[in-house]
Image: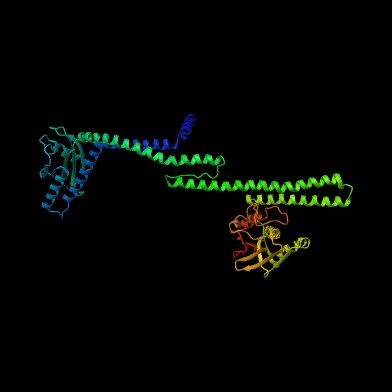
């Protein structure tokens, strides 16, 4: 059994390496052969048996009907004779009805070689068998003495269950079908050759039509695998191949975007890492060579080293946070808290930046509203939006934060007075390391703040966006949804 399984496994593997167009052609040919084998079996080999069985079944059915009609008092003799005559002509059948004393009551002869009307005593023999039968009927297949033609006799006792009134005999010839089979055989041979030729042509056409788009898609996929992302997949031929081609074309476009973003990410991360590392090394060397014995200079240089270390730590932390958010490993820890109070606390943290660098952060609160979300992550969102506004605001260094209570939640807006963002660039502003040409940072950041904002808000399922006007600044916003009723 194990060897058989291994053999079938090898066959399946070998068959799996066959090209699609050849597979389809083989399936089509096998199907055609099966159809013709069935036709030959049923039309040639079993035709005679089918004919005999159908003829016998028809005679039995007709005999049972005539027997019931004979015992039906509502049918008079003349009507019954017409019925017998019609049945005899319709079914090419001889009929003989005999009373219980053996006298003939009705006789219909439809063909010359009838057994029940012959003089060789077949009828008396059948009558004797019928009287002895327990089932009340007999079936007999014999041959005519003159022509040796098959002939079928059906006999039935005419009885109401208690009394016997007579006996019914039906006799029909079983016509030989050899000549008919010969004609059908010749026709089938001609039809077989014609249809096999047509089937071959159709199978080749269909297999080519199905396989050709897939072959084209495969060639294009190899180009895509080699880094040619602008390749266009063509799947003309049928719906499924076209949908596959469209999907792969779209996938190629998205891979191209991801590849570009990946390169930009590597370039930006390398740049952001190289600058503080260079400064760390430079100031460490300065402490070693120049300011090691000068407390004032040494403290100044060490402060710069600490600041750059903090910047590196912030960059690494932001990259880890974003990685966790985008991988789906971060979970929400929702709690209820007052949003106005939370906003005041966040604004207070920026007082140091405001005093040191001259920025003014204006907060316009609404009535206190209790919200339910992940307090730490929403705080990170607001902090990043304000930090982004500080980095990109105009020369007046003004940043405006507003809380707006809505029927379905609370909307938080952070507005700067910078140069604004072009409309076609707005959809890219939340991408990692994207920097608008109209924006120039005054405060160093990691370039991942808005990407983290996007990931956190998507995790919460909150709406967010940005409205911007060139020369007037931008408004970044998001909406904290109300809790569903019942929660």
Q: Is residue 234 left or right of residue 365?
A: left
Near-viewer residue (214 or 456): 214
Residue projecting furthest to the top: 3
- Give residue 36's position: percent from left, percent from top: 31, 36
Is residue 134 in sight in this rendering? no
- Give residue 363's position: percent from left, percent from top: 70, 67
Compared to 58, does 30 lie above or below?
Answer: above
Q: Residue at x 14, y 48 (%)?
A: 86
Near-viewer residue (286 or 105): 286
- Give residue 112's position: percent from left, percent from top: 11, 38
Compared to 463, does 322 lie above or below?
Answer: above
Q: Residue at x 11, y 36 (%)?
A: 118
Q: Residue at x 15, y 34 (%)?
A: 144
Q: Is residue 42 left or right of residue 439?
A: left
Residue projecting furthest to the bottom: 367
Q: Is residue 469 left or right of residue 86?
A: right
Counting every numbered tag in the picture gives: 0
């Amino acid at each position: 059994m194990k060897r058989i399984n291994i053999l079938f496994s090898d066959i399946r593997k070998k068959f799996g390496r066959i090209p699609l167009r050849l597979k389809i052609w083989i399936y089509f040919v096998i199907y055609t052969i099966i159809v013709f084998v069935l036709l030959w079996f049923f039309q040639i080999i079993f035709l005679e048996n089918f004919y005999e069985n159908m003829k016998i079944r028809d005679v039995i059915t007709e005999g049972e009907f005539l027997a019931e009609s004979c015992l039906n008092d509502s049918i008079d003799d003349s009507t019954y004779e017409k019925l017998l005559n019609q049945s005899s002509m319709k079914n090419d059948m001889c009929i003989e009805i005999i009373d219980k004393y053996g006298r003939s009551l009705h006789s219909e002869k439809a063909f010359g070689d009838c057994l029940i009307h012959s003089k060789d005593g077949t009828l008396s023999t059948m009558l004797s068998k019928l009287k002895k039968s327990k089932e009340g009927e007999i079936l007999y297949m014999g041959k005519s003495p003159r022509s040796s033609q098959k002939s079928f006799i059906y006999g039935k006792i005419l009885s109401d269950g208690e009394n016997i009134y007579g006996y019914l005999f039906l006799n029909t010839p079983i016509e030989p079908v050899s000549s008919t089979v010969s004609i059908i055989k010749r026709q089938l041979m001609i039809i077989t050759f014609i249809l096999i030729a047509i089937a071959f042509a159709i199978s080749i056409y269909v297999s080519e039509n199905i396989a050709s788009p897939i072959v084209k898609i495969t060639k294009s996929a190899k180009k895509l695998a080699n880094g040619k992302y602008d390749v266009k997949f063509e799947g003309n031929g049928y719906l499924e191949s076209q949908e596959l081609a469209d999907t792969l074309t779209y996938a190629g476009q998205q891979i191209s975007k991801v590849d570009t973003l990946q390169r930009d990410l590597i370039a930006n991360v390398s740049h952001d890492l190289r600058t503080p590392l260079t400064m760390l090394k430079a100031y460490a060397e300065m402490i070693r060579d120049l300011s090691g014995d000068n407390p004032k200079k040494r403290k100044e240089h060490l402060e710069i080293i600490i600041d750059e270390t903090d910047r590196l730590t912030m960059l690494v932390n932001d990259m880890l946070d974003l990685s966790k958010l985008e991988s789906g490993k971060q979970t929400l820890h929702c709690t209820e808290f007052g949003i106005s109070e939370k906003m005041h606390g966040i604004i207070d943290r920026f007082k140091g930046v405001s005093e040191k660098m001259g920025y003014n952060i204006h907060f316009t609160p609404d009535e206190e509203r209790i919200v339910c979300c992940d307090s730490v992550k929403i705080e990170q969102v607001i902090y990043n939006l304000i930090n982004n506004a500080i980095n990109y605001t105009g020369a007046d260094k003004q940043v405006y934060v507003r809380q707006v209570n809505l029927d379905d939640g609370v909307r938080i807006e952070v507005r700067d007075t910078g140069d604004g963002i072009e409309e076609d660039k707005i959809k890219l502003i939340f991408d990692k390391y994207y920097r608008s040409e109209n924006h120039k940072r005054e405060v160093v950041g990691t370039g991942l703040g808005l990407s983290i904002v996007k990931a956190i808000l998507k995790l919460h399922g909150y709406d967010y966006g940005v409205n911007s006007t060139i020369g007037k600044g931008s408004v970044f916003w998001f909406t904290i949804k109300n809790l569903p009723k019942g929660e």
